Image (tube, rainbow, N blue to C red):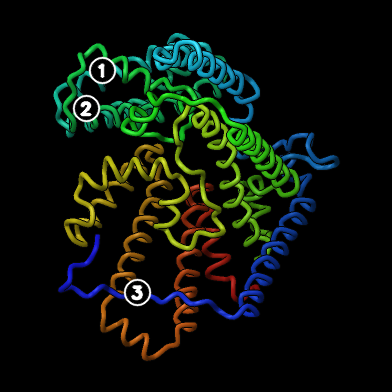
C-alpha cells in the first residue's frame, strides 16, 4: 500500500549497507572453517566409537562409500527411503504416466482419472482397511462442512486427529499390518490428509458454491487422493489446487525438458549428500547414546548440532523435491523447497521459508481467521499461539513437542517485539546518532546470532527430544566458554 500525501513514509528499522570486502571475507573464512573443523571432529568421534555404536544400534554395512558403515537411526530417512524403493517411487511413476496420457487423450477427464488412480494406489499401498479409514475421515469432514460452520469443521478435524492417538484404535490398526512401517505409513497419510480435508471444509464454509453435493464430494476426493502429495506432502491448499489443476496443459517445450532433467539431477545430488553425511558422520546414533554423547568435546558437539540441522534440511530437499517435481509436471505450482538452514537467522524466517506449504496453510486457516496483527500485539500473540498450538497437536502432542512449540512461539514474539521497538522514530534517531551504518549492521548480526543459536536449540529439541536439548544447552551454552 502507498502512503497518502499527508503521511511520511516510515524509515526502515535498520539501514542495510555493504561491509568492507575484507571483513566479509574474514567472516566467510571463519564460518566455513568452523563448520569444516567441527564436522571433522564429528567424523573422528564416529570412527573412535564405531564399535560401541554398532553394538548398540546395529549400524548398517555401508553400500555407498566403501569402508564406512551407515547410520540408520534417523527413522524418517530410513522409513521413506525404504518405502520409496519398495513401492512409492513406482506408484508415483504410475501417476506420471496416467497424468501425461490423459492430458493428451482426454484432458477434460484427467482430474477424475487421477482421482481414481490415487485411490487405487492407496488401496495397493495401505490395503482395503486403510483406504476405508481414510474415506470415513473424508466423509465425516465433508458431512460436517455442509453445516457451513467453520468452528464445527475445526472441531471435527481435531476429533479425527485425536483418533490417530487413541490406544484402542492404534492396537486395532496395527493388527491390520505385518510390520510397524506399514502402520506408520497409514498414520502419516492420515495426518497429511487431515490438513487437506480441513482445507476443503473451511473453503466450503467460507465460499458459496452452486455445485451439487455429489460433485463437491468428488472434488474433495480428487483433492484428497491427489497422489504426489498424498503420503508426506508438501501441503497444497484446496484453493490453490482447484485453481491450477484445471488449467489446460501446453505442449512441453525444450526448456521445460531441460528444467525437468536439471531437477532430477539435483534430487540425486541431494540424495547423495544425505547418504554421504550418514556414512561419514553418525550424527543420529551419537545423540542417542548417552555414554558417547557425554564423551564428545565441545567442538564435536557443536558440529553434531550443525550436522543434524543440515541433514534435516537436505532430507526434506529430497522428500519434498520428488513430489514437487511430479506436481510441476501436472501444471501445478508447488510450494517452494526449503531454504538452507545455514542462511536462516530468525524464527520467523525459519517458519516462512522451510516448510512453505505448511506456513501458508497455518496463515490462511488459523492466523488470519484469528485476526492476526489486525487486532494489535495481543491479537498477534494469540493468533500465533493458536497456530503453534495446532502444530504441536498435529505432530502428536508429545511433551518435547510442547517445549519446541513454546520456544518457537517465544522466538517469533520476541523478534517481532524487537523489530517494533527498533522501528520507533526516537529509537531509530538515537541509533543513527550513536552508530555508523556499518556498526548498525554488525549490531543486527549480533542480535541475529543469538536468535540463530536459540533456533538451533529448538530444532535439536524437535529432532532429539528434551534430554538431548538439555545436554546441548548445558554443554554448549552453559559450559561452552570454559571448554572452548
Direction from residue 255 to residue 52 in the image, left or right: right
> What residue is at 31 percent from the left and 86 percent from the top?
429
Q: Is residue 176 visible?
A: no
Mark 2 in CB contact with mark 1 (< 8 angstroms): yes
Alpha-carbon neighbours of circle 1 within 10 Å: few (<14), some, or many (≥20)?
some
- Residue that carries the numbered disc 3 in the rendered image: 13
- Helix, strand or loop for disc 2: helix
> What residue is at 36 percent from the left and 43 percent from the top?
360
Percent position of residue 198, x then y: 29, 30
Mark 3 in CB contact with mark 1 (< 8 angstroms): no
What whole-number distance in Å separates the C-alpha atoms at marks 3 and 1?
48 Å
Percent position of residue 272, x then y: 71, 41
Q: Between disc 3 and disc 1, whose residue precedes?
A: 3
Q: Tell me which corner region of the image, top left, top right, bottom left or bottom right, holds residue 180.
A: top right
Q: Tell me which corner region of the image, top left, top right, bottom left or bottom right, holds residue 256.
A: top right
Direction from residue 424 to residue 180 in the image, left or right: right
Q: Is residue 257 depicted above or below 385 in this figure?
A: above
What whole-number distance in Å separates the C-alpha atoms at marks 2 and 3?
41 Å
Q: Nearer the viewer, residue 134 or 212?
A: 212
Percent position of residue 12, x then y: 34, 73
- Helix, strand or loop for disc 3: loop
The numbered dot on residue 204 is 2
Q: Between disc 2 and disc 1, whose residue precedes?
A: 2
- Residue that carries the numbered disc 1 in the rendered image: 216
Q: Tell me which corner region of the image, top left, top right, bottom left or bottom right, holds residue 97.
A: top right
Q: Is residue 421 depicted above or below 261 in this figure?
A: below
> What residue is at 65 percent from the left and 41 percent from the top?
266
Residue furthest bottom as drawn = 434
- Helix, strand or loop for disc 1: helix
Q: Nearer the viewer, residue 402 or 422?
A: 422
Q: Is residue 275 visible?
A: yes
Amino acid at each position: 500500500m502507498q502512503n497518502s500525501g499527508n503521511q511520511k513514509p516510515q524509515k526502515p528499522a535498520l539501514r542495510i549497507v555493504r561491509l568492507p570486502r575484507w571483513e566479509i571475507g574474514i567472516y566467510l573464512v571463519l564460518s566455513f572453517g568452523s563448520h569444516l573443523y567441527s564436522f571433522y571432529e564429528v567424523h573422528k568421534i564416529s570412527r573412535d566409537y564405531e564399535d560401541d555404536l554398532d553394538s548398540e544400534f546395529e549400524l548398517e554395512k555401508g553400500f555407498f562409500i566403501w569402508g564406512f558403515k551407515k547410520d540408520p537411526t534417523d527413522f524418517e530417512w530410513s522409513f521413506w527411503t525404504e518405502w520409496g524403493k519398495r513401492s512409492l517411487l513406482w506408484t508415483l511413476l504410475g501417476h506420471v504416466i496416467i497424468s501425461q496420457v490423459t492430458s493428451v487423450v482426454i484432458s477434460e477427464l484427467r482430474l477424475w482419472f487421477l482421482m481414481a488412480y490415487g485411490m487405487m494406489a492407496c488401496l495397493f499401498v495401505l490395503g482395503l482397511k486403510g483406504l476405508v479409514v481414510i474415506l470415513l475421515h473424508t466423509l465425516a469432514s465433508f458431512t460436517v462442512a455442509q453445516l457451513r460452520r467453520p468452528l464445527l469443521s475445526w472441531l471435527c478435524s481435531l476429533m479425527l486427529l485425536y483418533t490417530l492417538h487413541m490406544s484402542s484404535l492404534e492396537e486395532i490398526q496395527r493388527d491390520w499390518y505385518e510390520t510397524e512401517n506399514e502402520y506408520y505409513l497409514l498414520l502419516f497419510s492420515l495426518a497429511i490428509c487431515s490438513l487437506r480435508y480441513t482445507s476443503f471444509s473451511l473453503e466450503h464454509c467460507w465460499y458459496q458454491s452452486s455445485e451439487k453435493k455429489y460433485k463437491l464430494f468428488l472434488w474433495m476426493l480428487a483433492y484428497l487422493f491427489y497422489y504426489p502429495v498424498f503420503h508426506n506432502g508438501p501441503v497444497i491448499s484446496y484453493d490453490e489446487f482447484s485453481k491450477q489443476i484445471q488449467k489446460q496443459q501446453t505442449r512441453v517445450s525444450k526448456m521445460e525438458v531441460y528444467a525437468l532433467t536439471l531437477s532430477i539431477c539435483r534430487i540425486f545430488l541431494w540424495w547423495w549428500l544425505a547418504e554421504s553425511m550418514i556414512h561419514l558422520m553418525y550424527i543420529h546414533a551419537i545423540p542417542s547414546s548417552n555414554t558417547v554423547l557425554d564423551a564428545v568435546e565441545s567442538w564435536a558437539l557443536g558440529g553434531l548440532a550443525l550436522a543434524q540441522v543440515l541433514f534435516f534440511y537436505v532430507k526434506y530437499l529430497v522428500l519434498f523435491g520428488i513430489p514437487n517435481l511430479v506436481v510441476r509436471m501436472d501444471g501445478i505450482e508447488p510450494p517452494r523447497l526449503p531454504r538452507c538452514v545455514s542462511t536462516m537467522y530468525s524464527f520467523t524466517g525459519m517458519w516462512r521459508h522451510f516448510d512453505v506449504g505448511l506456513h501458508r496453510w497455518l496463515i490462511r486457516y488459523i492466523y488470519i481467521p484469528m485476526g492476526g496483527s489486525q487486532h494489535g500485539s495481543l491479537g498477534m500473540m494469540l493468533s500465533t499461539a493458536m497456530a503453534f498450538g495446532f502444530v504441536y497437536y498435529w505432530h502428536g502432542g508429545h511433551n518435547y513437542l510442547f517445549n519446541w512449540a513454546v520456544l518457537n512461539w517465544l522466538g517469533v514474539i520476541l523478534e517481532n517485539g524487537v523489530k517494533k521497538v527498533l522501528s520507533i522514530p526516537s529509537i531509530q534517531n538515537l541509533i543513527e546518532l550513536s552508530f555508523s551504518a556499518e556498526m548498525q549492521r554488525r549490531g543486527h548480526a549480533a542480535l541475529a546470532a543469538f536468535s540463530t543459536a536459540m533456533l538451533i536449540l529448538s530444532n535439536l529439541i524437535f529432532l532429539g527430544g528434551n534430554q538431548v536439548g538439555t545436554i546441548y544447552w548445558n554443554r554448549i551454552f552453559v559450559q561452552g566458554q570454559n571448554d572452548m
